Image: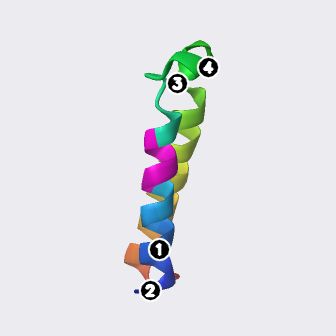
């Protein structure tokens, strides 16, 4: 597995954990999952361009 694949898997798992569906994170709103989603998109674009 390449570094990019490992990064994507880790980011997806963190993104699922940041979704405000859990009782302790409902007050956070969509900020954490939005930031992690943006980071996931950046990593995907870098992978498609061949930088990672």
Kindly check if marks 2 and 1 are in contact, taking CB atoms under 8 A apart as contact: yes
Q: CA distance from mark 3 to mark 1?
A: 24 Å
In the image, residue 15 sits, relative to residue 30, either above or below, namely below
**Disc 2 marks which residue?**
2
In the image, residue 13 sits, relative to residue 31, either above or below, namely below
Residue at the (48%, 23%) spot, across then down: 22
**Disc 4 marks which residue?**
28
Of helix, strand and loop, which one carries label 1?
helix
Q: CA distance from mark 2 to mark 1?
A: 7 Å
Judging depth in this view, the residue of 16 and 32 nearest the camera is 16
Of helix, strand and loop, which one carries label 4?
helix
For disc 2, the neighbor class at 10 Å (few under 14, some 14 to 19, many from 20) is few
Please identify the dominant SS of the magenta region. helix
Numbered mark located on residue 30 in the image: 3
Judging depth in this view, the residue of 42 and 11 nearest the camera is 11
Kindly check if marks 3 and 4 are in contact, taking CB atoms under 8 A apart as contact: yes
- Looking at marks 4 and 1 on the same chain, the residue that comes earlier in the sequence is marked by 1
Q: CA distance from mark 4 to mark 2?
A: 33 Å
Judging depth in this view, the residue of 16 and 4 nearest the camera is 16
**Which stretch appears magenta?**
12-16
Q: CA distance from mark 4 to mark 1?
A: 27 Å
Q: Position of residue 17 (x, y in %)?
A: 49, 40
**Residue, far front:** 23
Q: Quadrant of residue 31?
A: top right
Residue at the (52%, 36%) spot, across then down: 18
Please tell me whether residue 2 belongs to the stretch shown in magenta.
no
Q: Quadrant of residue 16?
A: top left
């Amino acid at each position: 597995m390449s570094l990019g694949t490992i990064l994507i898997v880790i980011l997806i798992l963190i993104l699922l954990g940041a979704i405000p569906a859990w009782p302790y994170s409902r007050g956070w709103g969509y900020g954490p999952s939005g930031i992690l989603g943006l980071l996931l998109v950046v990593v995907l674009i870098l992978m498609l361009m061949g930088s990672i």
